[in-house]
Amino acid sequence: MSCDFIALANAGVQALQPYQPGKPIEELERELGLKDVVKLASNENPLGASEMAVEACRKAAEGMYLYPDSSGFELKNKLSERLKVSPKQITLGNGSNDVLDLIARVFLEPGKSAVFSQHAFVVYPIAVQACGARAIVTPAKNWGHDLDLMAAAIEDDTKVVFIANPNNPTGTWLKKAELEAFLAKVPEHVIVVLDEAYVEYVDEPDYPNGLDYLAGYPNVIVTRTFSKAYGLAGLRVGYAISSPEICDLLNRVRAPFNVSTQALAAAVAVLDDAEYLRKSREVNAAGLKQLAAGFDRLGLEWIPSVGNFIAFRTSKDGVSVNAAQVYQGLLHKGVIVRPVGVYAMPDFLRVSVGLESENARFLDVLPNVLDAL
Ligand SMILES: *Cc1c(COP(=O)(O)O)cnc(C)c1O
């Protein structure tokens, strides 16, 4: 009688589970009647928005009856100057998530495969699966990517390798020498995506800047975002940098108006807000130290991170406890963090770096929650 719409969906989509976002503050306040909720769940910038971005966004709002500039002329030009690449190498996205989807749509389909690591960013499996392609997942090494295994996992039908550097949710990063050895091994006809969503936070001397490899490896695509260090998560703007040929392919499937007028204006403005970026980095570096010290004090295992978040093991007297219970306990204390069960890390939680007072509040309630279990 009624149609089986699931059977009607593309094979890849039938097996998909939707992305689970961090819980919104308003939702928790509504559900538990709480006030003063702290959200450390989505790697958002705790500083609030850049005033220069807000001002530009307000001005741009008056143009909301017009379609945005599909070419993103001004933003691409500005990025091109900053990054020393041609505007022809830049593809703008509705967040870098959009760009990752475009890459999957251009290069993947049934009968093709993509390689990524265990515990890697969850958008990769979703994007790959949605295209009906096969995922080849390699075991992690010290919670990070094992590039030797990833290179060895490439098969004849492999078209894309996704690498998050640093990785979310583990915060692990790859060093120059490792990445260079990997790139030298990958066949030229396999696209290597270097997802650098947190690049602005990284201060390690041997951290590789993906842009340095574009000239030598035309199969590399670097993706970046304004959502994290630039504080524009709600506006949705990210980009890819690649060869002009790959950029042209991505633009063939890109929705023509995928980045809004306000997002374009705010992104252009925030690139000039050097003080905002400086403060983002400073607050994050201090927060990472504060959280790490707090975990040490509580005797909790944590994964060293160069992102704006840390994953820690939920345990009591050294014995792992189910992270879902700790997550719930924290919610009842008004602190939202992120469960990472979907990343095959059932006894870990990921906490985003907040302001000093927010980190302190989290560290303050965490032992109470653990004690109550
Ligand atoms: C947050 C994140 C992104 C993308 O976020 P957008 O808001 O879509 O730009 C991409 N990759 C990783 C690893 C991330 O953590």
Image (cartoon, helix red, strand yellow):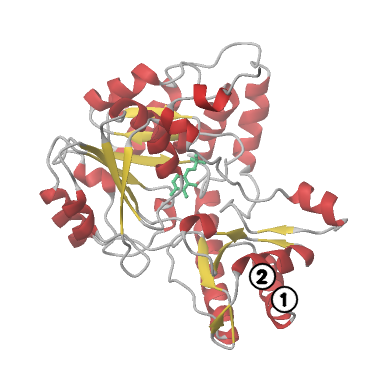
Observer-nearest of 295 and 108: 108
Horizontal side of residue 52 vs 180, given as left or right: right
> What type is the residue that disc 2 sits on?
Val
Horizontal side of residue 103 vs 271, given as left or right: left
> Which structural element holds mark 1?
helix
Percent across and percent down for residue 315 are 58, 79
Quickly name the residue at label 1: 369
Q: Residue furthest bottom?
A: 317
> What type is the residue that disc 1 sits on?
Val
When the figure is inspected, residue 281 is found, relative to residue 322, above or below; the finding is: above
Quick one: quadrant of the C terminus?
A: bottom right
Percent across and percent down for residue 140 are 33, 63
Q: Residue at x 18, y 61 (%)?
A: 177
Quick one: label 2, few (<14), some, or many (20+) residues within 10 Å?
many
Observer-nearest of 241 and 39: 39
Q: Residue at x 44, y 22 (%)?
A: 72
Q: Is residue 139 visible?
A: yes
| Label 1, label 2: how far apart the Cα atoms are | 6 Å
Asked whether the residues under the numbered discs 1 and 2 touch, taking CB atoms below 8 Å apart as contact, a structural biologist would say yes
When the figure is inspected, residue 6 is found, relative to residue 3, above or below; the finding is: below
Percent across and percent down for residue 56 are 61, 30
Residue 326 is marked as: 2
When the figure is inspected, residue 352 is found, relative to residue 129, above or below; the finding is: below
Quick one: label 1, few (<14), some, or many (20+) residues within 10 Å?
some
> Which structural element holds mark 2?
helix
